[in-house]
Image (tube, rainbow, N blue to C red):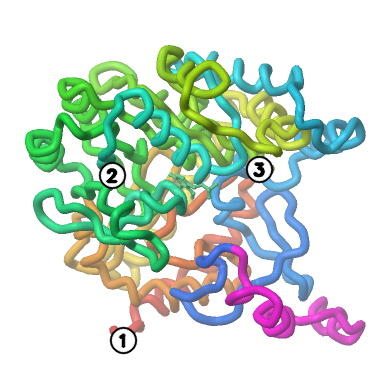
Amino acid sequence: QGTALRQAQGAATNDELFDRARQAIPGGVNSPVRAFGSVGGTPRFLVSARGPYVTDAEGREYVDLVAGWGPAILGHADARVVEAVQDAASRGLSFGSSTPAETELAELVEQRVAPVEQLRLVSTGTEATMTAIRLARGFTGRDLLVKFAGHYHGHSDGLLAAAGSGLATFALPGSAGVPAEIAGLTLVIPYNDLDAVRAVFAEHGDRIAAVIVEAAAANMGVVPPLPGFNRDLVGIAHAHAALVISDEVLTGFRVSPAGWWGLEQGETAYTPDLMTFGKVIGGGMPVAALGGRAEIMQRLAPLGPVYQAGTLSGNPVAVAAGIATLRAADASVYTRLDEASVIVADAVSAALAAEGVAHAVQRAGNLFSFVFGEAVAGGARDYDEVQRQEAWRYPPFFHAMLDAGVSLPPSVFEAWFVTAAHDDAAIARIVEALPAAARAAAAATPP
Ligand code: PLP
């Protein structure tokens, strides 16, 4: 009824908005996965968001399990964050100068995450990882970088490297426009495979500047590190005088107050040399950061020879959102995130099981996703295994949920995100939608 009313009033539909967007913007989107390429259909054009809900241009409300791709741990438009942003904005949008708030945000991070002795603010996760790699190269005087197949660290040239197979291979570019010479500086090895780590260091150890790793992988769907993997990875890299960059852009301040690093205390504890943050640290505004050992961080300009800069780095409005978010994220927020993630993941799993759909729940803290099919029913530990799933079961599942008013990540290779605002009412709406979606997944046929 709301939709009919809005259309009668001349408001555009999602289809009309997508047509228009495709004229003005390549593919109609400013980040590819938003185009629904892997699930088909028309993306929803969102106009507002509050708590656990988002609303599209047709006036339709959805329970949201994307959470802005991670930042919205408190729920959308949390009053404390919005107020902090409005207050900062009223005092000026951008100074291009130092502010007291930047130091406050850096201190908040350093108090929570012990390996971060100093922090540099940037605007996106891509910038954070790109700068961390430049810094690692500048610090070690070496060129090669090791990354893991299926790990995403943003879209800078050297990180868009496709996976080689088996033993370490020099990567081929994963995107047009990346010179082979640049991609060739990145070595790609399988995740959760310490033998592959040892092998790549045995062969190239004296040329490797750093290993970059998602603290827990969540960009091929969720694939948690095996117990002790991060610890042993640091041990091997350090034995070869290489650095470890632990990428917590997605996990930082989401899976615990101290991110994934905070969850691995005790026997599997590890100390990365550099860490990167994004998403939650900006509370939905463009803030990201790299931090780590002071000795390394002080090689950045203006103290050291490694250059980095940004007109909008430490932007006062964005930093205000980050500070307000971190301050509001108390223990009860993390308790609720954990609870909500378990309830939703278990409900999805039960609905799939009831329809006989073989699957596994992949969990890393309060992040989760699903892999479909007998081949992966025991869970997936790396990119090869993730790709063995029946990915074609996801699009009909996704669309059944969307039709019922639940917005999921538009790809099976993405994590699902809850917020602390996912209350019983929001979760009940998810649970109600599940049986039909599970039936759609069961009825799906391979392409
Ligand atoms: N690193 C990880 C682990 C990410 O998940 C992402 C984005 O999803 C990035 C880096 C890149 O961050 P941004 O999209 O802010 O450039």
Question: Is label 3's Cβ within 8 Å of ligand 1?
Answer: yes
- What element does badge 3 sit on? loop
Mark 1 = which residue? 447
Q: Is 191 located above or below residue 394 in the figure?
A: above
Q: Give the residue type at disc 3.
A: Pro
Circle number at residue 147: 2
Q: Give the residue type at disc 1.
A: Pro
Marks 3 and 1 sit apart, C-alpha to C-alpha, by 39 Å
The disc, 2 or 3, on the residue closer to the chain's N-terminal end is: 2
Q: Position of residue 370 (x, y in %)?
A: 35, 59
Q: Position of residue 323 (x, y in %)?
A: 69, 27
Q: Position of residue 361 (x, y in %)?
A: 33, 53
Q: Nearer the viewer, residue 212 or 359?
A: 212
- The magenta region covers 1-30
* Residue 334 in magenta stretch: no
The quadrant in which residue 261 appears is: top left
- What element does badge 1 sit on? loop
Q: Give the residue type at disc 2.
A: Lys
Q: Is 269 located above or below residue 83 in the figure?
A: above
Q: Nearer the viewer, residue 416 or 207?
A: 207
- What element does badge 2 sit on? strand
